[in-house]
Image: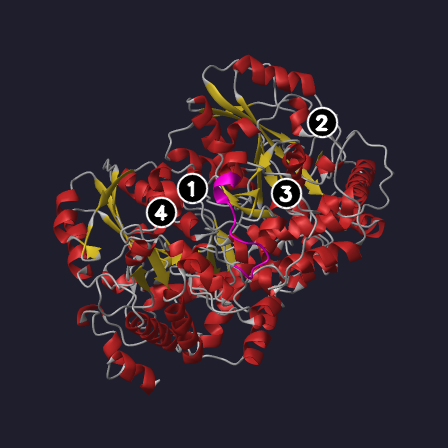
């Protein structure tokens, strides 16, 4: 990775700084640079950033698969870039066709009956799903205030349930899976929903899902599927057949749209028939071969974002599904194969796998034994950077101490996995001081995150004061 | 593949999935065979050909509008190091995007006059939802005042964000000038939301009155802004804003409505109540300047149910596009474009007045404006569409025969003249 002492934008030499317009605004400290300086600046910054194309990026729960260049090409088109969301429907039939078809594809893949593409991210989909649950119980005149969530869940689950106005009950896991007794004890007439990821965040398939769904049905509650781990089950099973009522997908995970340094993503929400009438407006419908927006949905929760979601992200996912078709199943097979292979290699290299057994698309190591040597998960993670690998997700899920959560995805070769495993083995035998002081070869050494919180320097003006 | 299977001691791929109970197994996906890249590209091109872009059919719709994006912006956001990367949880491998995010926050604070900015909400509507929740957390009250004239999509999103926390949304009337009434006296108000320019495109420069209204009610003032507008008019900090939100469309495309980004900035005293990701400056162990995400104890991955928001993925790459745009334009370039927008809008409004439309509000406007004619906006739009023009947005719910137009630097004199001629033709046809 390149190393530059790259100045901030306002530290680069300014040009044409004379005020040329007489306007109400007196002061506006935005530098006037020439384009050459600006482009050089951002190219330097990009060279100090690790992307999927740079190398192995095995972040657990994030599904950092390869982003096809085709997707970037198909969205560079005036017929989307310069199309307004409120144009006459006759002039946006192409966009409506894509929304309509993508919804159908996602229904088929997940086994659900209807989808809305409006949510802009996974957590946004969760919030939408929880608002649908709320609207449903209101419509049948039941007051249900509680949402049950396993302690291995993504942090967004409890946060989304809370935002929709539910109280969250967290249940402990047993052997890395849902504890059926704990679940049964938590269920009551107040239970609105149970939110679950399957396979869960340890990469373990919850095989008791049929019983879980049965319990929820008996209680009249909703079973919610967090689709973050959908890459593990394409073509093998689906949330619909497992008995889930509401599903969100992360198109930026399973369907290969790029993560963009944090976004934009897309978090479509799918539901079973009995919940369809609550989906956000507008829905895209088809009549006599023409598509149109249907806003006349009296039970709908209304809108959840400005227009119809992150449309160009949706188009990329649509292109990906066209490209792969039914062979999406092969992706899942390879992702699961890669994950189990890498887990065995790392276990043989001396790493501990809590709740050891077959895994789906990801697995979690515990590095707690290294504590005896004063080494933490973060030290190993930082050392991996020196060897050119992006570290896995660390310290999640919370139920594993010194967690190292690894998701290799289907795109990585055996050679890459072997190199990663060899490096992990090598690190295990490295000197403590080397690890604790790593990284050594990056644009900066270990970053002081505690000081960042203490000083809260959030703009270049703050920087001047300090 | 066999080698891998041998290593893990599994006979076949199928065995890897044997843990999934038979009862819930499916026999593959019900999708067509995959296509090759050429086929996919051609198919999508063909589908998109059913659309009409701004260049084939001039459009005057408001809210989000066509703007020019310098090619260098595309080049910058097209760097794989930016667009394929994840949220920068490992700062040592992400200094580039972290510094860019820090610069984005700095630019947003320069424009809005606030002290801190996050690295985006999904859009301006969700930003309003989050700002309202934040105001209620700060004031420990649950009433939010909003202008009656807010785009109904935005209102609907706000109601959804307000639902869980039981917020009470009160709509405030506007006066004959189209501006929100400031002589209101509501009790227990947590936040007041105003827009500048407002939904009718009107510029609100009653700076003292606005600040006084806020102080009288001891409420948090949330101001919805247009970032381009801010390059030539006073920032909301000038009239007492505590939280500033907006649509960060600069450098991004319309894309049938998204992705864009929700601007979200506030005063320093409130940063611990802010939703979303924030980047801070610090040093590495050698004392070299470095950047990392900070104040994360506000967020869902740490605080779970007690977080300030559930947001995780945001619109980070759109922030980079925004930053690249502003960097390339500079202050002078931004002001040039803003002035051009305002001039073009004024020109079109003048032309429309000459053919019989009137401006219902005697107020200054930026790049959107409302006109009233003796024809229903929907009917006018249908006729215009036949002439290959997309008219403005009918706003009959506020004003009979009212139409809201949006005009930018993309609307040349020729385009405006042509459109006005066609509008005139329609008016004559109807009479």
The reply to whether callout 1 and callout 4 are in contact (CB within 8 Å) is yes
Residue to which mark 4 is pinned: A155
Q: Which residue is more in the foreground, B67 or B117?
A: B117
State which region is magenta: A440-452
- Residue B220, image x, y percentages: 53, 23
**Is tag 3's residue or tag 1's residue first in the polypeptide sequence?**
3
Residue to which mark 1 is pinned: B299
Mark 3: few/some/many CA within 10 Å (<14, 14-19, 20+): many
Q: Left of A146 or right of it: where is A78?
A: right
Report the residue at 34% width, 39% height from top.
B305
Residue at mark 2: chain: B
Please identify, in this view, whether the residue under mark 4 or under mark 2 is nearer the observer. 4
Q: Which residue is more in the foreground, B252 or A229?
A: A229
Mark 4: few/some/many CA within 10 Å (<14, 14-19, 20+): many
In the rendered image of this protein, does residue B270 appear above or below residue B17?
above
Please identify, in this view, whether the residue under mark 3 or under mark 1 is nearer the observer. 1
Residue at mark 1: chain: B
Residue at mark 4: chain: A
């Amino acid at each position: 990775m390149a190393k530059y002492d790259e100045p901030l934008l306002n530290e680069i030499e300014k040009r044409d700084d004379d005020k040329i317009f007489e306007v109400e605004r007196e002061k506006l400290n935005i530098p006037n640079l020439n384009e050459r300086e600006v482009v050089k600046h951002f190219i330097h910054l990009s060279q100090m950033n690790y992307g999927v194309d740079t190398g192995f990026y095995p972040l657990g729960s994030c599904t950092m698969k390869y982003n096809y260049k085709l997707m970037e090409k198909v969205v560079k088109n005036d017929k989307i870039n310069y199309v307004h969301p409120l144009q006459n429907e006759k002039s946006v039939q192409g966009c409506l066709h894509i929304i309509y078809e993508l919804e159908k594809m996602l229904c088929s893949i997940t086994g659900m009956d209807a989808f809305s593409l409006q949510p802009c991210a996974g957590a946004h989909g969760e919030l939408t799903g929880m608002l649908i649950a709320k609207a449903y119980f209101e419509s049948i005149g039941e007051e249900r205030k509680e949402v049950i969530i396993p302690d291995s869940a993504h942090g967004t689950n409890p946060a989304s349930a809370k935002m929709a106005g539910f109280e969250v009950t967290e249940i402990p896991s047993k052997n890395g899976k849902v504890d059926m007794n704990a679940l049964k004890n938590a269920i009551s007439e107040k239970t609105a929903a149970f939110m679950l990821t399957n396979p869960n965040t340890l990469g373990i398939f919850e095989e008791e899902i049929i019983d879980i769904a049965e319990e929820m049905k008996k209680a009249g509650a909703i079973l919610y599927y967090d689709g973050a781990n959908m890459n593990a089950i394409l073509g093998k099973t689906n949330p619909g057949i497992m008995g889930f009522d509401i599903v969100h997908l992360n198109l930026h995970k399973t369907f290969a749209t790029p993560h963009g340094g944090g976004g934009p993503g897309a978090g479509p929400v799918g539901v079973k028939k009995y919940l369809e009438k609550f989906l956000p407006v507008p829905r895209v419908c088809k009549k006599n071969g023409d598509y149109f927006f249907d806003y006349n949905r009296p039970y709908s929760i209304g809108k959840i974002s400005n227009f119809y979601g992150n449309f160009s992200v949706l188009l990329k996912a649509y292109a990906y599904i066209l490209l792969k078709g039914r062979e999406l199943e092969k992706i899942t097979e390879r992702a699961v194969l890669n994950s189990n292979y890498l887990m065995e290699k790392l276990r043989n290299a001396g790493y501990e796998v809590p709740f050891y057994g077959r895994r789906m698309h990801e697995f979690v190591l515990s590095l707690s034994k290294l504590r005896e040597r004063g080494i933490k998960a973060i030290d190993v993670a930082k050392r991996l950077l020196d060897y050119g690998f992006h570290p896995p997700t660390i310290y999640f899920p919370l139920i594993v101490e010194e967690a190292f959560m690894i998701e290799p995805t289907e795109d990585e070769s055996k050679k890459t996995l072997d190199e990663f495993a060899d490096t992990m083995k090598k690190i295990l035998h490295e000197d403590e001081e080397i690890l604790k002081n790593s990284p050594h070869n990056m644009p900066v050494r270990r970053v002081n995150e505690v000081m960042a919180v203490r000083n809260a320097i959030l703009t270049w003006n703050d920087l001047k004061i300090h | 593949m066999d080698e891998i299977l041998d290593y893990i001691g599994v006979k076949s791929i199928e065995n890897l999935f044997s843990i999934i109970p038979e009862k819930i197994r499916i026999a593959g996906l019900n999708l067509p065979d995959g296509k090759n890249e050429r086929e996919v590209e051609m198919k999508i091109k063909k589908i998109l050909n059913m659309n009409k872009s701004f260049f084939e059919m001039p459009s005057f719709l408001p809210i989000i509008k066509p703007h020019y994006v310098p090619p260098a912006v595309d080049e910058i956001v097209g760097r794989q190091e930016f667009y394929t990367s994840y949220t920068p949880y490992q700062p040592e491998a992400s200094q580039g995007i972290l510094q860019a995010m820090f610069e984005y926050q700095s630019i947003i604070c320069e424009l809005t006059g606030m002290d801190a900015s996050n690295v985006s909400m999904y859009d301006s509507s969700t930003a309003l939802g989050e700002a309202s929740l934040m105001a209620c957390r700060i004031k420990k009250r649950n009433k939010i005042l909003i202008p009656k004239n807010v785009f109904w999509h935005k209102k609907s999103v706000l109601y959804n964000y307000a639902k869980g926390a039981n917020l009470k949304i009160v709509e405030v009337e506007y006066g004959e000038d189209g501006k929100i009434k400031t002589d209101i006296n509501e009790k227990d108000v947590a936040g007041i939301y105003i827009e500048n320019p407002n939904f009718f495109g009107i510029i609100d420069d009653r700076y003292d009155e606005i600040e006084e209204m806020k102080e009288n009610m001891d409420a948090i003032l949330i101001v919805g802004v247009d970032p381009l507008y801010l390059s030539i008019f006073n920032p909301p900090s000038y009239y007492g804003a505590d939280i500033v939100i907006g649509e960060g469309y600069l450098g991004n495309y319309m894309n049938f409505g998204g992705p864009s980004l929700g601007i979200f900035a506030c005063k320093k005293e409130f940063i611990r109540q802010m939703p979303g990701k924030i980047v801070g400056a610090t040093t590495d162990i050698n004392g070299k300047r470095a950047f990392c995400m900070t104040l994360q104890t506000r967020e869902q991955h740490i605080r779970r149910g007690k977080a300030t928001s559930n947001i995780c993925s945001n619109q980070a790459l759109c922030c980079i596009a925004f930053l690249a745009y502003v960097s390339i334009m500079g202050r002078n370039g931004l002001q040039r474009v803003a002035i051009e927008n305002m001039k073009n809008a004024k020109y079109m409004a003048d032309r429309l007045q000459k053919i019989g439309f009137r401006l219902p509000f005697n107020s200054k406007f930026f790049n959107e404006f409302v006109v009233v004619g003796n024809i229903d906006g929907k009917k006018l739009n249908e006729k215009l569409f036949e002439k290959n023009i997309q008219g403005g947005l009918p706003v009959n719910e506020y004003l009979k025969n009212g139409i809201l137009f949006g005009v930018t630097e993309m609307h040349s004199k020729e385009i405006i003249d042509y459109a006005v001629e066609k509008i005139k033709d329609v008016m004559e046809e109807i009479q």
